[in-house]
Amino acid sequence: MKIARLSASLLVLTLSWVGHVQADSSEWHHVEGGAIRIVTSGSPDTDGQVRGALEIKLDRGWKTYWRDPGESGVPPMIAILAGGKEAPVQIDYPAPKRFDDGYSTWAGYDRPVSLGLTFTLPDDVEPSQVEADVFLGVCETICVPVQARLTLDPSTNAHAGEDVTTVAATFAAMPGPAREGFEARLVDVSDAAMRVETKLPEAVRPLDLFVAGTETLVLGMAELDEASGTFSIAVQDRDEKGGDKHLAYTLITSAGAVSGTLELP
């Protein structure tokens, strides 16, 4: 649903590039407004799992988007291919900010940011055969969709010390996991709106809430009722026939941010 909001005139600006250097981190792919690359912490563990980071450099005045930008924007998408086979990948996001550009409100970042990547290689694939197809948007006055294929070899460890540090710092910057007594809970949902309450320690105040929609559920930005500490979220479009019932959220508070999942009935 979100991708369909891009106009054809923006799509013609898409940039593509294929990196040919085999290393545990890809080469930087430079685009208008910044650059991107993928770094890994080295060889897969005993379960074939690799941890990494998608580093996004942004020039001054440029921005990029959270997992669900909101009214406009392009959510990051990453497909990991290992030996021609798709490897499942989990993307972790730092706490975003809310932006209002005068005609839309959206969630994202206005400074360099790193997304956490965790992917599992198939059993019969060598870790040297890894490619990542990345699609995201960066914007200043207009938004530029960026498409790149980044090539890397997690088994090389050519820059192991530096890259391990980069990946560790990326995951350390993520919101902590929501937990009992420090969380958001869905208490009511209708065709028009959702209501989410917060459970927080004494003296901790909720500041903002970001909830990601799904392919069948489009949400507006959360609005805080400071007196009750609850948020209301407009439901802009919903397909009752199916879709994911798990909604990823990030709750921003005066004591830091946590991420968790809201469960739809």
Image: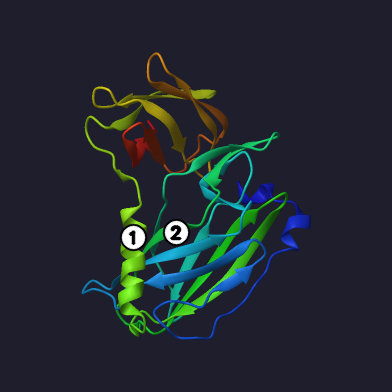
Q: Position of residue 102 (x, y in %)?
A: 69, 34
Q: Position of residue 153 (x, y in %)?
A: 40, 82
Q: Nearer the viewer, residue 162 or 65?
A: 162
Q: CA distance from mark 1 to mark 2?
A: 9 Å
Q: Position of residue 221 (x, y in %)?
A: 54, 32
The residue depicted at 73 percent of the width and 63 percent of the height is: 13
Q: Which residue is mark 2?
A: 114
The residue depicted at 24 percent of the width and 37 percent of the height is: 179
Q: Secondary structure at mark 2?
A: strand
- Amino acid of disc 2: Ser
Please identify the quarter of the rendering in which residue 198 is found: top left
Residue neighbourhood size for the residue with mark 2, other residues' Cα within 10 Å, grouped as few (<14), some (14–19), many (≥20): many
Q: Looking at the rendering, in which quadrant would you find the C terminus? A: top left
Q: Secondary structure at mark 1?
A: helix
Q: Looking at this rendering, what residue extends furthest in the top direction? A: 227
Please identify the quarter of the rendering in which residue 14 is found: bottom right
Residue neighbourhood size for the residue with mark 1, other residues' Cα within 10 Å, grouped as few (<14), some (14–19), many (≥20): some
Q: Which residue is mark 1?
A: 169
**Residue 117 against residue 177 in the figure, above or below:** below
- Amino acid of disc 1: Ala
Q: Is residue 112 visible?
A: yes
